[in-house]
Image (tube, rainbow, N blue to C red):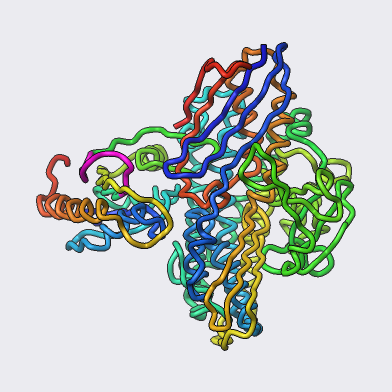
Amino acid sequence: MTKKITISPVTRIEGHAKVTIHLDDEGRVERTYFHVNQFRGYEKFTEGRFYDELPMITPRICGICPVSHHLAAAKACDEILGRPVPRTAALLRELIHMGQMIQSHAMHFFELAGPDLVLGWDADPAVRNVVGLVRANPELALKAVKLRKYGQTIIEEVAGRRIHPSFAIPGGVNASLSPGSRDRILKQVDEMIAYIREGVSIILAFIEAHKEECDAFAAFPSAYMGLVKDGGALELYDGIVRMAGRDGRVLDEFAGKYYLSHIAEKVDDWSYLKFPYFKPLGDPEGHYRVGPLGRFNASDRIGTPLAQEEFGKFKTMNGGKPVESSVYYHYARLIEAVYALERAREILEDGDILSRDVLNPGPVTNEEGIGVIEAPRGTLFHHYWVDERGTVKKANLIVATGHNNWAMSQAVDNVARGYIQGHDIPEGVLNRVEGAIRCYDPCLSCSTHAIGRMPVVVEVYDHEGAFVASRERA
Amino acid sequence: MTETLLLGIGNIYREDDGVGPKCVDLVSFPGVSRLTVQELVPELAETILDYERVVFVDASLQGGAAELLPLLPRDTSFPLTHRMTCEGLLALTEAIYGRAPRAFLLSIPGGSFDHGETLSARATENMEKARGILERFLRSGDAGGA
């Protein structure tokens, strides 16, 4: 008898994701899928708007990473203007992007990865959550909250408000940085770096204690994509897109505005969300991963010292080959947070940072604009088509969770095959299946463009579709 | 310590989901602070700690009329999403800082959650009622509860 296990969020409005695990008669996994309901209403919503509204509208896609959408939209609008952004404006945009990275990565570590890493995969689910984590290690929890707060403080000091700022506008930004704001942000950098390095130590200790399991956990070959600059250095705000192959060699490098020539999307009948792949390799060899692990496997180095030190260790984790295990996303994520803090300090200490030359406005000169940025979860494309007056005719957004759609399905399939034997499935095993998804930190708000309030239900069915059991997460 | 925080939750570009922030924008009272967010996030624990009481103002899919309900801290976990509930935020605040403010939820039923900036007739009507409930609540000083 075969059995189907479903891990299914039920959305408040529309858009959902679920995991279905199909077992055969002997309880072995036949195939596992991660399904995401794609809802692209925001693209439609932008049609008929004036292009310079988009840096304000598109951040509402997500309450977690609005700054990424804000900046990708502004960069696309810069192309519509066809004018260079003043250097200081670019630095200030990058600075709030670092704030976003710090708070987003800290949130993932604290809320989603932390309970598994600190309390263990098999801990009682009643306590294996953020409150349980606080009770187990209150000092760590307080530091995690302070880290998130610090990231938000950067955004607020630079952009005037911490949530949905209107700071980046076509051609630059709408305010320069005050010396007081610069000094207040700088004052806390070292303390925050110490906090995040504590998190790095926790992850390394977890990996060391569970080395065999970690190395095999949701490990599979893929290509890897991320922005790089200066011949291969990790880049989060600007740069060119690099695609690296399964063996780590560079397959291609291209300007983000040519993404449609390099990336195609496959449709499968079991998911509403498409499966992007690198065109020259085709499907399935061309499927790639984005986000921290994807960026690290696509990069040669990091441009700041402390992050580079950790990056060097990361690169040795699989004998110099690309790191394939999804658990290492957690490690890469916190190394990126170290980089974001160090890079924030570099930007704040730049001689041009207080300059008032922050805007280079002009008329609409191009009827198409593409903005690319590395959002916390991976490469984010905003592509707008406008008429000669700047009215939006069409928009296309490709978000990180979309890029990782194939990889998340591979990850849950890999873990399910490795751990599920027979119909008696312990909670800790189901937690590992969910944990495979958590490695990628999918943003369902972004990928479905829904509201992002999605309780999770686990349902079990037999091969005839009869309900066997359920487990509700919300 | 400031007395009360009104915390509007929702997306103003998702029609009735924006009713919470829009309702909060309508209410101005001495000693009352206002904040609007799209989603609840952990660092709000530090923010709400500064208040004696917090009123979360949020849209609802259920219920016929706006209502004000007391809230207690409650552990909630959404291990695949970034969702945080009002009760979960209170529980987090209590766990980290040893205390949490008294809290209430002003729930405002809506009817349409598509993309758009306008409220449905149902949400508009409920928002006006919610505003009245909120103003009476703030005027009363709330000695004991909702």
Stretch in magenta:
B58-69
**Is residue A342 visible in the rendered structure shown here?**
no
Say if A292 sits above or below A325 in the image. below
Q: Nearer the viewer, residue A56 or A436?
A: A56
Q: Nearer the viewer, residue A61 or A123?
A: A61
Residue sitting at x 56%, y 82%: A354
Residue A447, horizontal then vertical, whole percent: 58, 50
Q: Is residue B60 found inside the magenta-colored segment of the image?
A: yes
Q: Is residue B52 left or right of residue A461?
A: left
Which residue extends farthest left? B140
Q: Is residue A452 left or right of residue A204?
A: left
Residue sitting at x 47%, y 76%: A180
Q: Is residue B144 left or right of residue A160?
A: left
Q: Is residue A131 found inside the magenta-colored segment of the image?
A: no
Q: Quadrant of the C terminus of chain A?
A: top left
Quadrant of res A79: bottom right
Say if A349 sits above or below A1 in the image. below
**Is residue A48 visible in the rendered structure shown here?**
yes
Residue A397, horizontal then vertical, whole percent: 61, 60
Q: Quadrant of the N terminus of chain A?
A: top right
Quadrant of res B65: top left
